[in-house]
Image (spheres, rainbow, N blue to C red):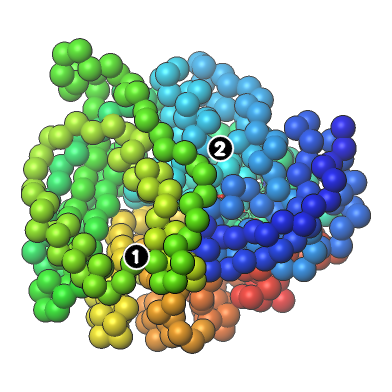
Amino acid sequence: MSLDDPRRQDLIGWGRTVHRSAEVRRPAVDGDGLVDTVLAAPKITVRGAGRSYGDAALPGAGIVVDMTSCRRIVSFDQGSGVLVVEAGALLKDIIDQTFPLGWKLPVVPGTERITVGGAVASDVHGKNHPGAGSFGNHVLWLELLRSDGQVTELSAGKDADGFWATIGGMGLTGIILRAAIQLQRVDTGWLIRNRRRTGSFEETIEAMQSLAEQQELDPDRHAVAWLDGHGHGTALGRGIVDEFYSASTLDLPNGVAPYPELRVSGTRQRQSLPGPGVVSRTTIAAASAARWHLSRSVNSQIVALRPALCPLDRAEGWPAAFGRRGLVQYQFAVPPEDFGVLREVLEFLATHGMTPALATLKNLGFGTAGPLSFPIPGWTLALDLPARWLHRPDTLRPVDKLVAGAGGRVYLAKDSVTDPEVIPLMYPRMWTWRSTQQRLDPVGRWTSGLAERLELLS
Ligand SMILES: Cc1cc2nc3c(=O)[nH]c(=O)nc-3n(C[C@H](O)[C@H](O)[C@H](O)COP(=O)(O)OP(=O)(O)OC[C@H]3O[C@@H](n4cnc5c(N)ncnc54)[C@H](O)[C@@H]3O)c2cc1C
């Protein structure tokens, strides 16, 4: 079998801010023809499920190779929990298969609808990062198709530099073909949730800090806070802090099955609403106030694990609600002592009439050794903003400066707006990464919209 006929397609990132038309090649299910395509194309962007928000999986120059057809589970050892899987497999499909066998992925981001290749290339993190680390911490080895057509196995013991440059390497070291992942035992598909409503930014930070200490000791402890980005004084940064930990079968009421039946919404892309969409300053203010006022502090609630960890998978229409111009998610991390920057960013947005539609705070622990991996110990705040508010490309430059000044960084998998000049400050090991990237790709075949916009390769 050979590759599909070349076809031009209109591609978008999940936030719908960037649109590109490109020739898209999809390998045959057995991967046949992929090497020939790679050797024939001078410039290639690798794409998984296309759930990065900005232009990470959109083409720069050249063609796009879409890996979603290579999605087989190659092997699973039920004794050790080692899974070997093709890079185009969705996390959702892995969870569907392995959950009932009592095994789970140790790291799941806010959506299950991403590929293993995308999870490795962005080194994704979940709400349990302080204890579990990021996705790359659980990868035992990778198979990488390099730009010279050779397939190389990489691991922490076999070309460690190449391995760590690929984890978090945003698809710029080669095409990940397969990965071996160490899964973890799971007792039930349920979590116990403690919810606390906080009355101020300080209270939110204090609650998350004390959860971070517990999270460091338990890879199964998840924490996330929704922050009210609206309002002034103490209202700014008040929120709802959720802590989740695993429920054992003993915790479940009689008659409750260990694995809940899931009603999953479809993955069909919703049409963007014409004009500005339903997300506006008025609706954000009303929704924020209602969310905070209607929530209550409550402990020991049993909730289904998958929707708790991936709430937006039940809201596929979220980006469409931002209208034709789409949604920018600005996600950044700052060190533990710099939580003041979180508040400064919220204040900057509030005073410039840009209250985020969603502001989500998580704790981060130690990252992987990947020089381009996002997580650093501290805080990460993700802010959903209507793209139409960012009138000029430099609207968020003051925020870039605040983040870089604190030794923080933006998350490349979500980015579409950051100033290229601050990227080397944010990722000080960029130079190390570049020399490994150039060794793995001496002909300069791999690229992407993100790589070109942020000058990651030059
Ligand atoms: C609702 C939502 C919630 C999210 N929550 C989180 C979160 O909590 N934590 C988090 O870390 N991220 C989160 N993300 C971001 C998402 O996990 C990443 O953007 C992820 O990389 C997307 O994977 P994908 O398969 O869609 O890859 P794409 O978006 O298609 O590609 C992402 C990057 O991976 C590269 N890539 C893809 N496949 C391969 C391959 N086979 N070989 C080499 N490179 C490849 C691409 O070149 C690109 O640079 C969220 C995204 C959404 C939409």
Secondary structure beneath label 1: loop
Q: Which of 158 and 180 is in front in this view?
A: 180
Q: How crowded is mark 1: few (under 14 residues within 10 Å), some or many (20 or more)?
A: some
Secondary structure beneath label 2: loop
- Left or right of 330? Residue 1 is right
- Left or right of 191? Residue 295 is left
Q: Do the residues labelled 2 and 1 touch (CB within 8 Å)?
A: no
Residue 246 visible to an observer of this rendering: no
Say which quadrant the N terminus sits in. Answer: top right
Q: Residue at x 77, y 57 (%)?
A: 8
Disc 2 residue lies near ligand 1 with CB under 8 A: yes
The percent coordinates of residue 446 (x first, y second) are 76, 61
Q: Nearer the viewer, residue 183 or 12?
A: 12
Name the residue furthest top: 255
The mark lying in front, picked from 2 and 1, is 1
Residue with the mark numbered 2: 90
Q: Which residue is drawn at 77% across and 64% down?
A: 438
Residue 253 visible to an observer of this rendering: yes
Name the residue furthest front: 274
Residue with the mark numbered 1: 278
Instruction: Please name the amino acid that badge 1 sits on.
Output: Val
Return the mark for residue 251: none
Is 225 placed above or below 452 here? above
The percent coordinates of residue 323 (x first, y second) are 44, 66
- Left or right of 415? Residue 301 is left
Instruction: Please name the amino acid that badge 2 sits on.
Output: Leu
Is 386 placed above or below 395 here? above
CA separation in Å, label 2 and label 1:
30 Å
Q: In the rendered image, which quarter is residue 423 located in? A: bottom right
Which of pointers 2 and 1 lies earlier in the amino acid sequence? Answer: 2
Q: Residue at x 63, y 48 (%)?
A: 48
**Total tally of numbered discs in the picture:** 2
